[in-house]
Image (spheres, helix red, strand yellow):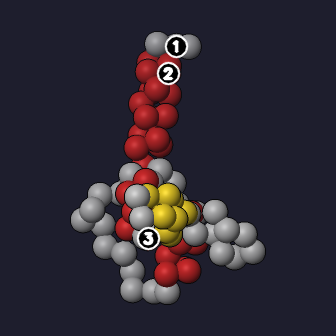
Amino acid sequence: MGTGGHNVPLIKDRYGIRKLTPRECIRFQGFPDTFKLPKIARSHLYKQIGNSVSVPVIKRIAKEMKKCLKNGQ
């Protein structure tokens, strides 16, 4: 990851080091491939994606909380 406003995730692949695309980043957050990215600057996309919540993680936490509440724990 860069710093100073250049927080773009990097990955090493068989061709060398490259930036992850906004689409790849949003996949890590649990969004489906059908999710439409807004037509804004890539820098803004990376910022919005970084500020989002990971939907699968939130679902799992909610599921576990529900279990605990149901069992009176």
Q: Which mark is residue 69?
A: 2
Contact? badges 2 and 1 (CB < 8 Å)? yes
Q: Can residue 55 be seen in this view?
A: yes
Who is closer to the viewer here, 8 or 60? 8
Q: Residues within 10 Å of mark 1 (few under 14, many from 20)?
A: few
Q: Is mark 2 on a helix, strand or loop?
A: helix
Residue under numbered circle 1:
72
- Residue visible at 52% across and 13% down in the picture: 72
Q: Can residue 26 be seen in this view?
A: no
Residue type at the position of mark 2: Leu
Check the picture and name the quadrant holding the N terminus.
bottom right
Horizontal side of 54 relative to 27 (left or right) equals right
Q: For the residues marked 2 and 1, what is the alpha-carbon distance in whole angstroms?
A: 5 Å
Residue type at the position of mark 3: Pro
18 in relation to 54, above or below? below
User: Which of label 3 and label 1 is nearer to you?
Assistant: 3
Residue under numbered circle 3:
22
20 in relation to 61, above or below? below
Q: Which mark is residue 14?
A: none
- Residue visible at 67% across and 68% down in the picture: 2
Rendering coords of residue 63 (x, y %): 42, 30
Q: Is tag 3's residue or tag 1's residue first in the polypeptide sequence? A: 3
Contact? badges 3 and 2 (CB < 8 Å)? no
